Amino acid sequence: MKRLLILTLLSFVSITNAQEKTTLTLKDAITYALENKADAKKAQLKVENSEYQIQEVRSRALPQITANGNLTYNPILQTTVIDGSAFGTPGTTIQAAFGQKWISTAGVSLTQNLFDQSVFTGLKAARTTREFYQINNQLTEEQVIENVANNYYQVYVLRQKLALVETNLKTTTKVRDIVKGQFDNGLAKKIDLDRMTVNLSNINTQKQQVINALQLQENALKFYMGMPMETQINIPQTEFEITPRAISETPNTANRSEYLLLKKQEELLVLQKKATQAAYYPTLSLTAGYNYIGQGPKMPWFAKSEDKVYWSDFSSIGMNLRVPIFTGFGTRAKVRQADIQLRSTQEDIKDTRLALDLDYKNAKTQIENSIITIQNQKENMRLADEILKNINNNYLQGLASLTDLLDAENASTEAQNNYTAAVLDYKLAEIKLIKSKGELKTLINN
């Protein structure tokens, strides 16, 4: 019994926690997304990884030191036939075996690049790669902010539509009840009651459609935030601030992350071309080694000279020069391929600059049009609401038909929906305008 009580209490706590809602302002949603969205995390990891890429390239310019050792057993020694005159028996040949049954060596070798053009170019490319990923991280954050803001506003608008539908549902239900009372008293026709019932059913259907759309949009918002789907969210019911932003000042496209990223990619391709051209240059390296060798009829390890095992050391220092002369035109082909990639990216830069200018122009136009539309729809909404109140009073006094009342309700609902859609269009255009000016991160500071 005690165990059952504990399980019941735990279930109640779980249900209570599951029903708790997280209140999200736009700033909260963006901050959460930047900390939890996989895209943002992966972009940060790429920045971190670029440091290790630099270390990897830098290692090619540092000395390479290796230790080596081996143990060899020769069951059958190779013999060599030599002239016997060297041993005082001219005219004869001697078959002699050289070497020992056991040979063991241990040593250390060093290699140092003195000149390798590809290493120098690689170091520059590695540092540029780090800058590339830093800009990419900034661009990814901006994309996360844009996605979250767009979906946040869409959720808000759908919640406004749901509130509107619920208000219309209450109003229509009251009118239906009035018509039903009139019908029961023989003051209204059955067709009037049926029309109100159908209208009420349609509004209920609209409500369910809005609820479904809202759930889908909330799920999309949670996805772009990196938030668990089971989390219940609540968006504060505050009015959107519709204030014209500064749109007279044309933004500097060269400051946009998309443009900066392509310019940095251009730098990388220039360095890639230089790295390919480095194959034309000679390379020079220093090598050195010190080794210790033991030989004898027994395994040299731990053996002494009394066992006829002898140890000695040897070392060497050298310079290696490699001069490429002819590679079958392979290097030339690689250089030309790198040049094609570079020119292709330069065309992308031109096209991207035009696209960014287009985004600003379109956002500016949409902002201007949305402000006009909002003003018009706000006035339409006021007039439609006033007309609805007048016709509703006239209907109750028998001075207006049910058709007039239904038309007025539909007109009022349409005006309110048009206003809400205009507000959404404005906010989405505002996001594009902020993006075109490279100021998306200001949404976190507001």
Image (tube, rainbow, N blue to C red):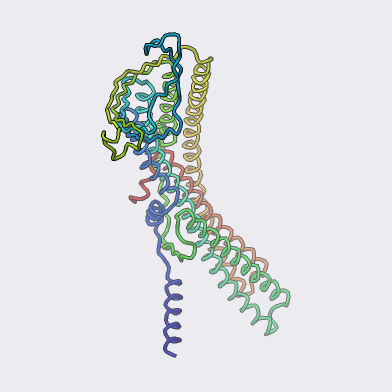
Q: Is residue 44 visible?
A: yes
Q: Is residue 405 visible?
A: no
Residue at x 50% of width, y 52% of height: 424
Compared with 393, 323 (above or below) is: above
Please name whichever residue, 158 or 193, is drawn nearer the observer in this view of the structure.
158
Please name whichever residue, 288 or 126, is drawn nearer the observer in this view of the structure.
288
Compared with 329, 13 (above or below) is: below
Q: Quadrant of residue 297?
A: top left
x, y (%) of residue 338? 49, 23
Residue at x 46% of width, y 66% of height: 232
Compared with 279, 154 (above or below) is: below
Q: Quadrant of residue 247?
A: top left
- Name, please, the residue furthest toward the bottom: 1
x, y (%) of residue 46? 40, 42
Please name whichever residue, 306 or 351, is drawn nearer the observer in this view of the structure.
306
x, y (%) of residue 65? 31, 31
Q: Is residue 187 left or right of residue 392?
A: right
Please name whichever residue, 259 or 354, is drawn nearer the observer in this view of the structure.
259
x, y (%) of residue 245? 40, 44
Count all numbered tags in the image, as a single digit: 0
- Name, please, the residue furthest toward the front: 89
Q: Which part of the image, by quadrant, shows the N terminus?
A: bottom left
Q: Quadrant of residue 266?
A: top left
